[in-house]
Structures are given as C-alpha cells and as structure tokens.
Image (cartoon, helix red, strand yellow):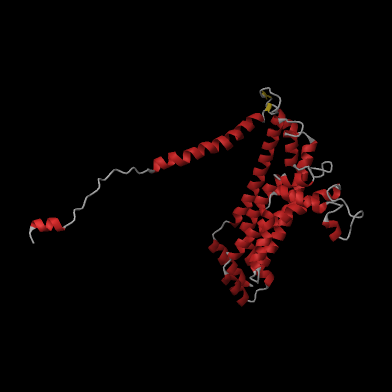
Amino acid sequence: MSSLDTQMSTPSIRTRPQYGRRHLGDRAIVNLFIWPSLVLLIAMNVFPLFYSLYLSFTEYSVISGTPPRWVGFENYRNILSSPLIWKYFALTGRFAFLSVGLQTIIGFAMAMIVRAKFRGSGFITTLILIPMMLSPVVVGKFWAMIYNPTFGPLNYLLGMPPPRGPDWLANPQFALWSVVLVDVWMWSPFVMLLCLSGLKAIPEYLYEAAAIDRASAWFQFWRITLPQVAPLLMIAILFRTIEAFKQFDVVMGLTGGGPGDATELVAVNLYRIAFLGRFDTGLASAFAYIVLIIIISISNLYIRYLNRYSEPASARVSGIQNATMLS
C-alpha cells in the first residue's frame, strides 16, 4: 500500500487546543471560605462579648437613649452585696444539685437496663430519647397542663381529683420540685446516652475474667463497670450542671419564677433585670459575667476531678485485672 493510500485510509485526528486551567490553591481556599466565616463569627460572638463586658462597668439602659456612663465596679458591688441575689444563687445551686443528681442516677440506671439486648430494645431506646429532642418551651407548656389542678391528668393519676388535688405550681413547697421533675424527665436520656456509649466500650473479656474468678455482680459493677463509665459520666454531670445554672426556658414555661420567688433561678432573675420593666443593661451585664465566672469555676473543679480518670486505658484494664485476681 502506498503512502498516499495510507494517508487517505487513516482518519485524521484533530487535537483540541489545551487551555490553561486555573486551580485554587490552599491559600485561596482559606481566603475564600475560612476568612468570611471567621469575620462573621467575630461579628456575631466576640464583639458582643467584649461590648457587654464594657457595659458591665457602666450605668446604661438600652431604652434610655443616653450613652453609657462609666461607673467602674459599682454594678458588681451592688450585685454581690444584694441578699436577694445570693438567695437566687442558693436556689439555683439547690436546683442544680437535685436535678443533676437525679438525672445521673436515673440516666445511669436506664443505660444499664437498655444495655442488655432484648426484643424491641432499639425502639424503646428511641422512645426514651424523645424528651431531649423537644423544645424546652414546649416541654414547659406541656407539663404546665399536666400539673393543672382542674384538668391536668397528674392529680387524677395520684387519686386526688379536683377539688382535693393540690396546685403543684402555685404552692411554694412543690413548685421547685415540679420544675426539677420536668428537667429530670427531659434530660435523663442525655445522661443515659453518654453512659450507654461508655458501657458498650467496655471490653467483654473483663467480665469473662471476673466470672471465671467467681467475682460477685457487685464487685464487677464497682471495679469494672463504674470505673470504665466514670469519665463519660463526669462529662455528662459537667454539661448538665452548666445547663442547670443557665436554666431558663422550662422555668418560664412552667412558673415564670413564681409563686413569689420560689423558682426564681439566676437566669430568670437576670432576664427580669435586663428586660422585664427595669431594662438595666449595665447591671444585667455585670450579673451575667458573675454567673459566667461561677460556671467556669465549677467547670474547673469538674475537670480536675475528671483528670483522675484520664490515665491510659491499658493501665485501668491492668488494674482491674489485678483486682479481679486478688478477689
């Protein structure tokens, strides 16, 4: 075949011109995505934080129309010298102790029950988690109807229909316990979820070794289960304690701080100072920073105690094995 025939039989291949493609480098991606988000974060969080810190040293009302007037530590001095404020702090501490304590016990017990595999365990676990998925305001209004002395089902379930049934939210003796019950109902599943993840991470051979050495069920719980779950349990207690000191939605939905000041928690009183009638922005800002300092102090105590359980897992396992052998 001649070269001319070869050229005629071979289809011509046209090459497209190669245009240069522009690739985004790492620096361009940082500038395009991270910096706008960082600027938005600073504008929405950091600036109000420092501005409220400045307002805490001033006499200022958001509705007065006058600029802030510098007063130094006067707002802090007024708050710390007020006996009512310390009363509300004591009430908030009592609420946190009761609610977090009950949540810890009930949540851990539910985790131990749900840990065992049985028919419908997944469905039951999902049902248990529903309360923590609801809005706190909705939960407060929902339980306010349950507590209602006229048509609420609680008094009927307790065998005290109207007019014999008490008004749980209007009685100063029962109002705080009523709020505690709602908070425990709503957030015990959160504690259960963290404890359940810790229980499922425990190696099964530890229980097998304990069973071979004829260790009792109490020994297995005290020396195997509890030490392994303790870090996550402490984290759950830390989160719930912080949230208990900031509790606002459920209280406002149930009692609004009443009757009288029986459920006037710190967050409710802070809202009252900042918005309800007084609009004392400077004093409210100082109050908020005092609450912040207290929460940070409590968190540091929890974190120090949590560090005791931060030893390597291998050391904890070897210690449990040695204790099992000694038993």
Total number of numbered discs in the rendering: 0
Is residue 228 shown to the viewer in this render?
no
Whether 141 is drawn above or below 285: the answer is: below
Image quadrant where one finds the N terminus? bottom left
The reply, left or right, for residue 82 in relation to residue 31 is: right
Residue pictured at 80% horizontal, 54% vertical: 146
Observer-nearest residue: 137 or 286? 137
Residue pictured at 64% horizontal, 57% vertical: 233
Q: Residue furthest right?
A: 163
Residue pictured at 60% horizontal, 57% vertical: 309
Whether 57 is drawn above or below 113: the answer is: above
Residue pictured at 63% horizontal, 29% vertical: 54
Place of residue 213 in the rendered image (x, y in percent of width and height, measured from the top left): 62, 76
Quarter-wise, where is residue 26 in the image? top left
Place of residue 116 in the rendered image (x, y in percent of width and height, measured from the top left): 65, 70
Place of residue 62 in the rendered image (x, y in percent of width and height, measured from the top left): 69, 28
Image quadrant where one finds the C terminus? bottom right
Place of residue 144 in the rendered image (x, y in percent of width and height, measured from the top left): 79, 50
Quarter-wise, where is residue 203 in the image? bottom right
Q: Residue furthest left?
A: 2
Observer-nearest residue: 138 or 87? 138
Is residue 4 shown to the viewer in this render?
yes
Quarter-wise, where is residue 80 in the image? top right
